[in-house]
Image (cartoon, rainbow, N blue to C red):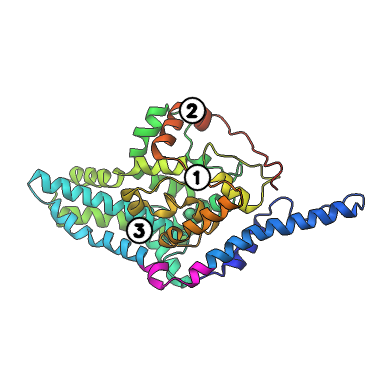
Amino acid sequence: MPNIQEECSEHEDVLGGGDGGLKVRSGVLSEMTNGVEENVHKESLMMELTRLVQKVMKESSWWERRGVDCSILTAAFLCLPPAFLLLGSHHLLWFLLGMLLMGVAHAVITVKGTHLASHGALSESQTWGKFWSIFFIEICGSFSAQAGIHGHIKMHHAHTNVIGLGDSSVWKVPFLPRMVYLFIAPLSVPLITPLVALAHLKGHSSFAVARTLLMIALGLYSQYWLLINVSGFRSTQGALFCMLVSRAMFSVPYIHVNIFQHIGLPMFSPTSRPKRIYQMTHGVLNLPRNPLLDWMFGHSLISCHVEHHLFPFLSDNMCLKVKPVVSKYLTERKLPYQEASYLSRLHLFFNKYQELMVFAPPITELVGVQ
Ligand SMILES: [Zn+2]
């Protein structure tokens, strides 16, 4: 487990914070002193919050830190045998139940599983962390682990809402009308994902390319083989259609969640970005708890997205556990703790689609707080 304090100060360094080094102009000593005090205060906000979170971590058992989430993922895998068997039933109701079970298990494994694996939150060992990232992202998620980790950790998390770096523009498809983008295009996510992975493989070593292609093929073929040999599908088209339906079942909320929590919030310039605590509290939003989405996507993507961006190495269950501490601290310090309901965000994106998803976002300067 990384030391939170080290990680925090490392982030502060890596992420710059724009004014990390005080500029001493014309030898104005008082200005310099005020600047130093102010800087120390800003450092201490993140450090103070980090200490509070670290205390919760120390008081938590392995079960709370990793066990709960590993059990949810195991449960999703255990749902697969009955799902394949139910899909072989001639009764419509059982067949539909099998389809639902397969869709839910697929969402848990490929959204919650790949997300936690990309953060290395499933294991304390680096070797196991690498194994899980390849297993979840490539075999289960049909994507490249290297590209996934680069895009999510090194870009989105490191440069949240910074224009041109972590501004969520990968999710924008400006030429699509809003109805198509919000409700129809997401259904093609299972088809697009491996194609995007192929595009990302350019420039990688031939070993990495071969491994990724092999792992993606293994994941897709395993499901196909089981549908033919366990569920008894008689046609290739039928099995492929079943794969598409189960993989696309929750891709509409998946796309929604990805855009709802960042787009439309303050965006920052790469040259004058705010300190990390301001960047994350202004640029990230939490959705309310929702039993289905909590299980399938994980707390860190739903009701604890702010906590996840402040402390990205915490598991879903730990994000939920530190949520009261983080929200109380931010509220007391008069920092934003942004929350909005799924429907209100959908309403906003539907009505302001052009502004949010087509035009370039305006840059926010957090004057007075940094
Ligand atoms: Zn993340």
From the image, tell me which residue sits under label 3.
139
- Looking at the rendered structure, the secondary structure element under dot 3 is helix
Kindly identify which residue carries mark 2.
Answer: 352
The answer to which of 181 and 66 lies nearer the viewer is: 66
For marks 3 and 2, the one nearer the N-term is 3
- What's under tag 2, amino acid-wise? Lys
Image coords of residue 123 (percent x, y): 43, 69
- Mark 2 lies on a secondary structure that is loop
- Which residues fall within the magenta stretch? 55-67
Q: Is residue 14 left or right of residue 111?
A: right
Q: Residue 15, image x and y in percent? A: 65, 55
Q: Which mark is residue 285?
A: 1
Q: Left or right: 109 with respect to 147?
A: left
Q: Which residue lies furthest to the left in this view?
A: 90
> Count of labels shown?
3
Q: Does the magenta stretch include residue 57?
A: yes
Majority SS type along the magenta span: helix
Residue at mark 3 to residue at mark 2: CA–CA distance? 37 Å
The CB of the residue at mark 1 lies under 8 Å from ligand 1 = no
Residue 13 makes an appearance in the image: no
Secondary structure beneath label 1:
loop
The residue located at (53%, 59%) in the rendering is 311
Q: How crowded is mark 2: few (under 14 residues within 10 Å), some or many (20 or more)?
A: some
- Which comes sooner in the sequence, label 3 or label 1? 3
Residue 205 appears at what percent x and percent y?
51, 59
Nearer mark to the viewer, of 3 and 2? 2
Residue 222's mark? none
Nearer to me, 276 or 153: 276
